[in-house]
Image (cartoon, helix red, strand yellow):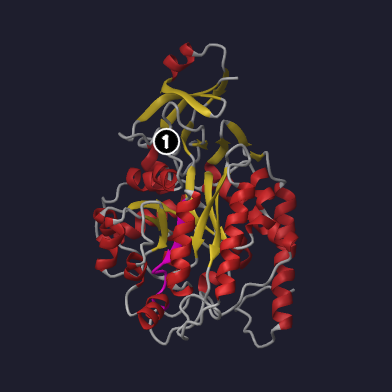
Amino acid sequence: MTIVIHGAAVATVDADDTVIYDGAVAVEADRILAVGPSRDVLARYPGAEKVDGSGKAVMPGFANVHTHLGMTLARGIYEDLSPPHKPPFTSGLAPLPLPPLEPEELKIFCQLGVLEAIRSGTTAILEDATGIEIYVEEMAATGARFLLTERAWDKAKGSIGDPAPFEVDRKQGERCLARIEALHAKRHGTAEGRITIGVSAWAPDMCSPELLRDVRALQQKLDAVATIHLNQIWGEVAAVKAERGRLPTEYLDELGFLNERLIAAHCRCMEPQEERRLGKAKVTVAFNSAIAARRGLSPRIGDLEGYGCRIAMGSDNMAEDMVEVVRTGLFMERVRRQDGRRPTPEHAHRWATVNGYHAMGITDGGALVPGNKADLIVIDLKGAHLVPVLRVVSDYVHQGQGRDVEAVMVDGRWIMRGGAMLTIDEERIVAEAQRLGKLAWGRLFESRPDLAVPAGFALG
Protein backbone atom coordinates (compact mmCIF):
# COMPACT_ATOMS: atom_id res chain seq x y z
CA MET A 1 0.00 0.00 0.00
CA THR A 2 1.33 3.41 -0.94
CA ILE A 3 1.21 6.07 1.79
CA VAL A 4 1.20 9.78 0.98
CA ILE A 5 1.86 12.28 3.76
CA HIS A 6 0.65 15.58 2.34
CA GLY A 7 0.11 19.22 3.26
CA ALA A 8 3.30 19.32 5.33
CA ALA A 9 6.50 21.34 5.39
CA VAL A 10 8.95 18.80 3.95
CA ALA A 11 12.63 19.31 4.83
CA THR A 12 14.35 16.92 2.43
CA VAL A 13 18.02 17.37 3.47
CA ASP A 14 18.87 16.69 -0.15
CA ALA A 15 22.00 18.13 -1.74
CA ASP A 16 20.38 21.58 -1.87
CA ASP A 17 18.60 21.43 1.52
CA THR A 18 15.31 21.79 -0.33
CA VAL A 19 12.25 22.64 1.76
CA ILE A 20 8.80 22.21 0.25
CA TYR A 21 5.93 23.98 2.01
CA ASP A 22 2.60 22.26 1.36
CA GLY A 23 4.69 19.30 0.33
CA ALA A 24 4.14 15.56 0.23
CA VAL A 25 6.14 12.39 0.63
CA ALA A 26 4.98 9.14 -0.97
CA VAL A 27 6.15 5.86 0.56
CA GLU A 28 5.76 2.29 -0.67
CA ALA A 29 7.18 -0.74 1.15
CA ASP A 30 10.48 0.46 2.65
CA ARG A 31 11.23 3.18 0.09
CA ILE A 32 10.42 6.78 -0.69
CA LEU A 33 8.59 6.90 -4.02
CA ALA A 34 8.24 10.63 -4.53
CA VAL A 35 8.72 14.01 -2.87
CA GLY A 36 7.17 17.22 -4.15
CA PRO A 37 4.27 19.65 -3.95
CA SER A 38 1.18 18.02 -2.44
CA ARG A 39 -0.97 18.60 -5.50
CA ASP A 40 1.50 16.80 -7.79
CA VAL A 41 2.20 13.82 -5.53
CA LEU A 42 -1.47 13.25 -4.68
CA ALA A 43 -2.33 13.32 -8.38
CA ARG A 44 0.31 10.65 -9.11
CA TYR A 45 -0.97 8.28 -6.41
CA PRO A 46 -4.77 8.71 -6.23
CA GLY A 47 -5.31 5.33 -4.56
CA ALA A 48 -2.78 5.86 -1.80
CA GLU A 49 -3.53 5.96 1.91
CA LYS A 50 -3.55 9.68 2.65
CA VAL A 51 -2.06 11.10 5.86
CA ASP A 52 -2.89 14.76 6.53
CA GLY A 53 0.30 16.64 7.39
CA SER A 54 -1.26 20.07 7.81
CA GLY A 55 0.50 22.06 10.51
CA LYS A 56 3.32 19.51 10.58
CA ALA A 57 6.81 18.98 9.23
CA VAL A 58 8.24 15.83 7.67
CA MET A 59 11.99 15.36 8.03
CA PRO A 60 14.49 12.50 7.87
CA GLY A 61 14.91 10.67 11.16
CA PHE A 62 18.02 11.39 13.21
CA ALA A 63 21.03 9.07 13.18
CA ASN A 64 22.70 8.73 16.58
CA VAL A 65 26.21 7.48 15.74
CA HIS A 66 27.48 7.08 19.29
CA THR A 67 25.60 5.91 22.34
CA HIS A 68 25.58 3.37 25.18
CA LEU A 69 21.95 2.54 25.89
CA GLY A 70 22.54 0.83 29.24
CA MET A 71 24.07 4.03 30.61
CA THR A 72 20.57 5.42 31.09
CA LEU A 73 21.04 3.83 34.52
CA ALA A 74 23.42 6.68 35.46
CA ARG A 75 21.08 9.61 34.71
CA GLY A 76 21.45 12.52 37.10
CA ILE A 77 24.69 11.06 38.50
CA TYR A 78 27.48 10.75 35.95
CA GLU A 79 26.69 14.09 34.29
CA ASP A 80 28.20 15.85 37.31
CA LEU A 81 31.14 13.52 38.00
CA SER A 82 33.53 14.26 35.15
CA PRO A 83 37.18 13.23 35.51
CA PRO A 84 39.85 15.94 35.97
CA HIS A 85 40.99 17.84 32.90
CA LYS A 86 44.41 18.53 34.41
CA PRO A 87 46.92 16.30 36.26
CA PRO A 88 46.75 14.31 38.42
CA PHE A 89 44.51 12.19 36.20
CA THR A 90 42.35 9.33 37.47
CA SER A 91 41.15 6.15 35.84
CA GLY A 92 37.68 6.11 34.32
CA LEU A 93 34.99 8.63 33.41
CA ALA A 94 33.46 8.88 36.90
CA PRO A 95 34.57 8.14 40.47
CA LEU A 96 31.55 5.83 40.94
CA PRO A 97 31.34 2.45 39.21
CA LEU A 98 28.20 1.67 37.25
CA PRO A 99 26.09 -0.79 39.27
CA PRO A 100 26.16 -4.29 37.76
CA LEU A 101 22.90 -5.42 36.21
CA GLU A 102 21.31 -8.79 35.65
CA PRO A 103 20.52 -9.53 31.97
CA GLU A 104 16.80 -8.84 32.39
CA GLU A 105 17.59 -5.54 34.09
CA LEU A 106 19.98 -4.53 31.32
CA LYS A 107 17.27 -5.19 28.73
CA ILE A 108 14.97 -2.73 30.49
CA PHE A 109 17.48 0.11 30.49
CA CYS A 110 18.41 -0.46 26.86
CA GLN A 111 14.72 -0.39 25.91
CA LEU A 112 14.34 2.79 27.97
CA GLY A 113 17.10 4.40 25.92
CA VAL A 114 15.51 3.38 22.62
CA LEU A 115 12.13 4.63 23.86
CA GLU A 116 13.57 8.09 24.49
CA ALA A 117 15.43 7.96 21.17
CA ILE A 118 12.31 7.18 19.14
CA ARG A 119 10.24 9.75 21.01
CA SER A 120 12.77 12.44 20.05
CA GLY A 121 12.89 11.43 16.39
CA THR A 122 15.81 9.01 16.14
CA THR A 123 15.50 6.27 13.55
CA ALA A 124 19.07 4.88 13.43
CA ILE A 125 21.34 4.11 16.39
CA LEU A 126 24.98 3.03 16.72
CA GLU A 127 25.30 1.16 20.00
CA ASP A 128 28.84 0.61 21.33
CA ALA A 129 28.87 -1.87 24.22
CA THR A 130 29.81 -5.29 25.53
CA GLY A 131 27.45 -8.24 25.77
CA ILE A 132 25.12 -6.95 23.04
CA GLU A 133 23.80 -10.45 22.36
CA ILE A 134 21.97 -10.23 25.71
CA TYR A 135 19.56 -7.57 24.45
CA VAL A 136 19.73 -7.66 20.66
CA GLU A 137 16.29 -9.30 20.33
CA GLU A 138 14.71 -6.49 22.33
CA MET A 139 16.46 -3.92 20.13
CA ALA A 140 15.16 -5.55 16.95
CA ALA A 141 11.62 -5.59 18.35
CA THR A 142 11.61 -1.78 18.74
CA GLY A 143 11.49 -1.36 14.97
CA ALA A 144 14.41 1.10 14.94
CA ARG A 145 17.52 0.68 12.80
CA PHE A 146 20.77 -0.35 14.56
CA LEU A 147 24.48 -0.63 13.93
CA LEU A 148 25.65 -2.74 16.88
CA THR A 149 29.38 -2.68 17.67
CA GLU A 150 30.71 -5.12 20.24
CA ARG A 151 33.73 -3.64 21.99
CA ALA A 152 37.33 -4.95 22.16
CA TRP A 153 40.15 -4.12 24.56
CA ASP A 154 43.09 -5.93 26.15
CA LYS A 155 44.28 -3.67 28.95
CA ALA A 156 44.28 -5.90 32.01
CA LYS A 157 43.48 -3.29 34.64
CA GLY A 158 41.92 0.15 34.79
CA SER A 159 39.82 2.17 32.40
CA ILE A 160 40.17 5.13 30.03
CA GLY A 161 42.59 7.73 31.35
CA ASP A 162 44.33 5.38 33.79
CA PRO A 163 47.86 6.69 34.47
CA ALA A 164 49.10 3.24 35.51
CA PRO A 165 51.37 1.33 33.11
CA PHE A 166 49.68 -0.77 30.42
CA GLU A 167 49.52 -4.46 31.28
CA VAL A 168 48.27 -6.53 28.36
CA ASP A 169 45.77 -9.39 28.73
CA ARG A 170 45.93 -11.29 25.44
CA LYS A 171 43.12 -13.67 26.41
CA GLN A 172 40.81 -10.73 27.06
CA GLY A 173 41.48 -9.38 23.59
CA GLU A 174 40.86 -12.78 22.02
CA ARG A 175 37.56 -13.12 23.86
CA CYS A 176 36.46 -9.72 22.58
CA LEU A 177 37.32 -10.54 18.99
CA ALA A 178 35.46 -13.85 19.26
CA ARG A 179 32.34 -12.06 20.57
CA ILE A 180 32.45 -9.62 17.65
CA GLU A 181 32.69 -12.43 15.10
CA ALA A 182 29.94 -14.45 16.79
CA LEU A 183 27.58 -11.47 16.92
CA HIS A 184 28.24 -10.72 13.27
CA ALA A 185 27.69 -14.32 12.19
CA LYS A 186 24.39 -14.58 14.06
CA ARG A 187 22.86 -11.11 13.76
CA HIS A 188 24.24 -9.18 10.79
CA GLY A 189 21.46 -8.36 8.35
CA THR A 190 18.68 -9.65 10.61
CA ALA A 191 15.35 -7.92 11.40
CA GLU A 192 14.83 -7.45 7.65
CA GLY A 193 18.18 -5.70 7.40
CA ARG A 194 17.58 -3.22 10.24
CA ILE A 195 20.30 -4.85 12.35
CA THR A 196 23.87 -4.58 11.13
CA ILE A 197 27.03 -5.44 13.05
CA GLY A 198 30.25 -3.45 13.22
CA VAL A 199 33.46 -3.59 15.23
CA SER A 200 34.71 -1.43 18.08
CA ALA A 201 38.02 -0.82 19.78
CA TRP A 202 37.37 0.78 23.15
CA ALA A 203 40.01 3.55 23.14
CA PRO A 204 43.70 3.98 22.22
CA ASP A 205 44.83 3.68 25.83
CA MET A 206 42.77 0.49 26.31
CA CYS A 207 44.21 -1.41 23.34
CA SER A 208 47.66 -2.80 22.54
CA PRO A 209 49.13 -2.31 19.06
CA GLU A 210 48.52 -5.99 18.34
CA LEU A 211 44.84 -5.77 19.22
CA LEU A 212 44.32 -2.62 17.17
CA ARG A 213 45.82 -4.38 14.16
CA ASP A 214 43.56 -7.36 14.79
CA VAL A 215 40.45 -5.16 15.05
CA ARG A 216 41.38 -3.41 11.81
CA ALA A 217 41.93 -6.77 10.10
CA LEU A 218 38.57 -7.99 11.38
CA GLN A 219 36.89 -4.82 10.10
CA GLN A 220 38.27 -5.56 6.64
CA LYS A 221 37.36 -9.24 6.81
CA LEU A 222 33.75 -8.48 7.79
CA ASP A 223 33.55 -5.45 5.47
CA ALA A 224 32.16 -3.51 8.43
CA VAL A 225 32.04 -0.05 9.97
CA ALA A 226 34.39 0.45 12.92
CA THR A 227 34.28 2.84 15.84
CA ILE A 228 36.55 3.96 18.68
CA HIS A 229 36.56 6.50 21.51
CA LEU A 230 39.32 8.94 20.56
CA ASN A 231 40.84 11.84 22.50
CA GLN A 232 37.84 11.78 24.80
CA ILE A 233 39.53 13.10 27.96
CA TRP A 234 42.92 14.58 28.73
CA GLY A 235 43.80 11.61 30.93
CA GLU A 236 43.56 9.36 27.87
CA VAL A 237 45.94 11.61 25.93
CA ALA A 238 48.43 11.56 28.82
CA ALA A 239 48.20 7.76 29.15
CA VAL A 240 48.92 7.16 25.45
CA LYS A 241 51.80 9.64 25.44
CA ALA A 242 53.30 7.96 28.49
CA GLU A 243 52.90 4.41 27.15
CA ARG A 244 53.38 4.87 23.39
CA GLY A 245 55.41 8.09 23.16
CA ARG A 246 52.95 9.74 20.76
CA LEU A 247 49.52 11.31 20.60
CA PRO A 248 46.49 8.99 20.37
CA THR A 249 45.66 9.78 16.74
CA GLU A 250 49.32 9.41 15.74
CA TYR A 251 49.32 6.02 17.48
CA LEU A 252 46.27 4.85 15.50
CA ASP A 253 47.53 6.29 12.22
CA GLU A 254 50.89 4.59 12.43
CA LEU A 255 49.13 1.25 12.99
CA GLY A 256 46.94 1.73 9.91
CA PHE A 257 43.76 1.97 12.00
CA LEU A 258 42.43 5.22 10.52
CA ASN A 259 40.13 4.74 7.52
CA GLU A 260 37.07 6.26 5.85
CA ARG A 261 34.77 3.67 7.47
CA LEU A 262 35.90 4.57 10.99
CA ILE A 263 33.69 6.63 13.34
CA ALA A 264 35.88 8.34 15.93
CA ALA A 265 33.84 9.45 18.92
CA HIS A 266 34.59 12.74 20.72
CA CYS A 267 37.92 14.07 19.32
CA ARG A 268 37.77 16.95 21.79
CA CYS A 269 41.25 16.82 23.39
CA MET A 270 43.30 17.11 20.19
CA GLU A 271 46.29 18.81 18.70
CA PRO A 272 45.88 20.28 15.18
CA GLN A 273 48.23 17.69 13.67
CA GLU A 274 45.87 14.96 14.88
CA GLU A 275 42.89 16.67 13.31
CA ARG A 276 44.76 16.83 10.00
CA ARG A 277 45.48 13.10 10.14
CA LEU A 278 41.82 12.33 10.69
CA GLY A 279 40.84 14.53 7.77
CA LYS A 280 43.41 12.98 5.45
CA ALA A 281 42.01 9.52 6.27
CA LYS A 282 38.40 10.75 5.76
CA VAL A 283 37.39 9.58 9.24
CA THR A 284 33.91 10.42 10.52
CA VAL A 285 33.88 12.33 13.82
CA ALA A 286 30.96 11.69 16.17
CA PHE A 287 30.23 15.14 17.64
CA ASN A 288 28.69 14.18 20.97
CA SER A 289 27.80 17.73 21.86
CA ALA A 290 25.53 17.30 24.88
CA ILE A 291 27.94 15.11 26.83
CA ALA A 292 30.84 17.33 25.70
CA ALA A 293 29.07 20.35 27.16
CA ARG A 294 28.47 18.45 30.39
CA ARG A 295 32.18 17.58 30.51
CA GLY A 296 33.16 21.20 29.87
CA LEU A 297 35.04 20.28 26.67
CA SER A 298 34.47 21.00 22.99
CA PRO A 299 36.02 19.60 19.80
CA ARG A 300 37.06 21.98 17.02
CA ILE A 301 34.34 20.84 14.65
CA GLY A 302 34.88 23.53 12.03
CA ASP A 303 38.57 22.64 11.81
CA LEU A 304 37.92 18.90 11.66
CA GLU A 305 35.38 19.39 8.89
CA GLY A 306 37.73 21.72 7.05
CA TYR A 307 40.49 19.11 7.12
CA GLY A 308 38.19 16.55 5.46
CA CYS A 309 36.34 14.76 8.25
CA ARG A 310 32.67 13.92 7.92
CA ILE A 311 30.81 15.25 10.98
CA ALA A 312 27.97 13.20 12.44
CA MET A 313 26.31 13.41 15.84
CA GLY A 314 25.76 11.20 18.88
CA SER A 315 24.22 11.49 22.31
CA ASP A 316 26.67 9.26 24.22
CA ASN A 317 25.85 8.65 27.88
CA MET A 318 22.65 9.04 29.93
CA ALA A 319 20.44 10.74 27.31
CA GLU A 320 19.13 9.85 23.85
CA ASP A 321 17.46 13.13 22.82
CA MET A 322 18.96 14.05 19.45
CA VAL A 323 16.96 17.29 19.30
CA GLU A 324 18.99 18.46 22.29
CA VAL A 325 22.17 17.14 20.69
CA VAL A 326 21.69 19.12 17.47
CA ARG A 327 20.88 22.38 19.21
CA THR A 328 23.72 22.00 21.73
CA GLY A 329 26.14 21.26 18.90
CA LEU A 330 25.05 24.35 17.00
CA PHE A 331 25.41 26.53 20.09
CA MET A 332 28.76 25.09 21.18
CA GLU A 333 30.33 25.51 17.78
CA ARG A 334 29.05 29.08 17.40
CA VAL A 335 30.47 29.97 20.81
CA ARG A 336 33.79 28.29 19.98
CA ARG A 337 34.04 30.15 16.65
CA GLN A 338 32.63 33.37 18.11
CA ASP A 339 30.35 33.43 15.07
CA GLY A 340 26.62 34.02 15.47
CA ARG A 341 25.81 32.77 11.97
CA ARG A 342 27.93 29.68 11.44
CA PRO A 343 27.28 26.84 11.50
CA THR A 344 23.79 27.30 10.11
CA PRO A 345 20.93 25.23 11.54
CA GLU A 346 20.65 23.47 8.18
CA HIS A 347 24.32 22.48 8.43
CA ALA A 348 23.92 21.09 11.95
CA HIS A 349 20.73 19.28 10.89
CA ARG A 350 22.71 17.62 8.07
CA TRP A 351 25.30 16.38 10.58
CA ALA A 352 22.55 14.61 12.51
CA THR A 353 20.71 13.07 9.54
CA VAL A 354 22.27 12.24 6.19
CA ASN A 355 25.87 12.43 7.47
CA GLY A 356 25.07 9.99 10.26
CA TYR A 357 23.32 7.58 7.94
CA HIS A 358 26.24 7.59 5.52
CA ALA A 359 28.73 7.12 8.35
CA MET A 360 26.78 4.03 9.44
CA GLY A 361 27.12 2.63 5.94
CA ILE A 362 23.54 3.44 4.90
CA THR A 363 24.16 5.45 1.75
CA ASP A 364 20.48 5.29 0.76
CA GLY A 365 19.18 6.92 3.91
CA GLY A 366 19.09 10.13 5.92
CA ALA A 367 17.49 12.30 3.22
CA LEU A 368 13.97 12.40 1.82
CA VAL A 369 14.69 11.69 -1.84
CA PRO A 370 13.13 9.08 -4.14
CA GLY A 371 14.72 5.66 -3.78
CA ASN A 372 15.98 6.22 -0.26
CA LYS A 373 14.95 4.26 2.78
CA ALA A 374 11.63 5.46 4.20
CA ASP A 375 13.02 6.51 7.59
CA LEU A 376 11.25 9.73 8.57
CA ILE A 377 9.66 11.69 11.37
CA VAL A 378 6.55 13.87 11.58
CA ILE A 379 6.76 16.96 13.79
CA ASP A 380 3.83 18.94 15.18
CA LEU A 381 4.55 22.60 14.42
CA LYS A 382 1.56 24.06 16.25
CA GLY A 383 3.21 24.53 19.64
CA ALA A 384 3.54 28.05 21.02
CA HIS A 385 7.33 27.66 21.02
CA LEU A 386 7.41 27.04 17.24
CA VAL A 387 4.84 29.45 15.84
CA PRO A 388 5.19 31.35 13.52
CA VAL A 389 6.82 28.78 11.24
CA LEU A 390 8.80 30.77 8.68
CA ARG A 391 12.03 28.78 8.19
CA VAL A 392 11.11 25.32 9.33
CA VAL A 393 14.59 23.80 9.79
CA SER A 394 15.92 26.82 11.68
CA ASP A 395 12.72 26.99 13.70
CA TYR A 396 12.98 23.38 14.77
CA VAL A 397 16.73 23.32 15.41
CA HIS A 398 16.58 26.47 17.54
CA GLN A 399 13.21 26.03 19.28
CA GLY A 400 12.05 22.44 18.87
CA GLN A 401 11.63 19.82 21.58
CA GLY A 402 11.65 16.06 21.47
CA ARG A 403 7.98 15.99 22.46
CA ASP A 404 7.09 17.75 19.20
CA VAL A 405 7.78 14.50 17.33
CA GLU A 406 4.40 12.82 16.91
CA ALA A 407 5.21 10.02 14.48
CA VAL A 408 8.25 7.97 13.47
CA MET A 409 8.58 5.67 10.47
CA VAL A 410 11.41 3.19 9.81
CA ASP A 411 11.55 1.10 6.65
CA GLY A 412 8.11 2.39 5.71
CA ARG A 413 6.52 1.18 8.96
CA TRP A 414 5.14 3.38 11.71
CA ILE A 415 6.84 2.63 15.03
CA MET A 416 5.28 5.67 16.69
CA ARG A 417 2.12 7.40 15.49
CA GLY A 418 -0.16 10.04 16.95
CA GLY A 419 2.24 10.32 19.88
CA ALA A 420 1.74 6.65 20.81
CA MET A 421 4.53 4.08 20.83
CA LEU A 422 3.62 1.05 18.74
CA THR A 423 6.58 -1.25 19.42
CA ILE A 424 7.47 -0.68 23.08
CA ASP A 425 5.28 -1.05 26.17
CA GLU A 426 6.14 2.44 27.37
CA GLU A 427 4.29 2.36 30.67
CA ARG A 428 5.92 -0.90 31.72
CA ILE A 429 9.44 0.07 30.66
CA VAL A 430 9.33 3.44 32.43
CA ALA A 431 7.94 1.94 35.65
CA GLU A 432 10.44 -0.93 35.63
CA ALA A 433 13.39 1.38 34.92
CA GLN A 434 12.48 3.55 37.90
CA ARG A 435 12.12 0.54 40.19
CA LEU A 436 15.23 -1.27 38.98
CA GLY A 437 17.36 1.86 38.91
CA LYS A 438 16.78 2.49 42.61
CA LEU A 439 17.42 -1.16 43.38
CA ALA A 440 20.67 -1.28 41.42
CA TRP A 441 22.15 1.85 42.95
CA GLY A 442 20.93 0.79 46.37
CA ARG A 443 22.74 -2.56 45.99
CA LEU A 444 25.94 -0.78 44.98
CA PHE A 445 26.02 1.61 47.91
CA GLU A 446 25.05 -1.15 50.34
CA SER A 447 27.89 -3.37 49.12
CA ARG A 448 30.41 -0.49 48.91
CA PRO A 449 30.14 1.69 52.02
CA ASP A 450 33.42 3.31 50.97
CA LEU A 451 31.69 5.07 48.08
CA ALA A 452 30.41 8.60 48.58
CA VAL A 453 26.71 8.93 47.85
CA PRO A 454 26.10 11.96 45.56
CA ALA A 455 24.32 14.94 47.11
CA GLY A 456 20.56 14.81 46.67
CA PHE A 457 20.54 11.11 45.87
CA ALA A 458 17.19 9.36 46.51
CA LEU A 459 18.13 6.40 48.66
CA GLY A 460 14.60 5.57 49.76
Residue 412 locus on image (x, y percent): 57, 30
Q: Dot 1, crowdedness within 10 Å: few (<14), some or many (≥20)? A: many
Residue 180 locus on image (x, y percent): 58, 58
- Based on the picture, tell me whether residue 327 belongs to the magenta stretch: no
Quarter holding the N terminus?
Answer: top right
Pick whichever, 144 or 297, lies toward us. Answer: 144
Pick whichever, 441 or 242, lies toward us. Answer: 242
Q: Secondary structure at mark 1?
A: loop
- Say above or below: 371 vs 262: above
Total numbered circles: 1
Q: Is residue 223 left or right of residue 139?
A: left
- Say above or below: 359 vs 131: above
Res. 243 in view: yes
Pick whichever, 40 or 369, lies toward us. Answer: 369
Q: Is residue 423 left or right of residue 209?
A: right
Residue 366 locus on image (x, y percent): 44, 39
Residue 155 locus on image (x, y percent): 52, 76
Q: Which residues are magenta?
A: 225-235
- Say above or below: 116 vs 206: above
Res. 75 in view: no
Q: Is residue 370 left or right of residue 92?
A: left
Image quadrant of residue 395?
A: top left
Identify the residue at image location x=55%, y=77%.
169
Disc 1 residue type (three-letter): Ala
Quarter holding the C terminus?
Answer: bottom right
Identify the residue at image location x=47%, y=78%.
83
- Say above or below: 345 vs 178: above
Residue wearing tag 1:
367
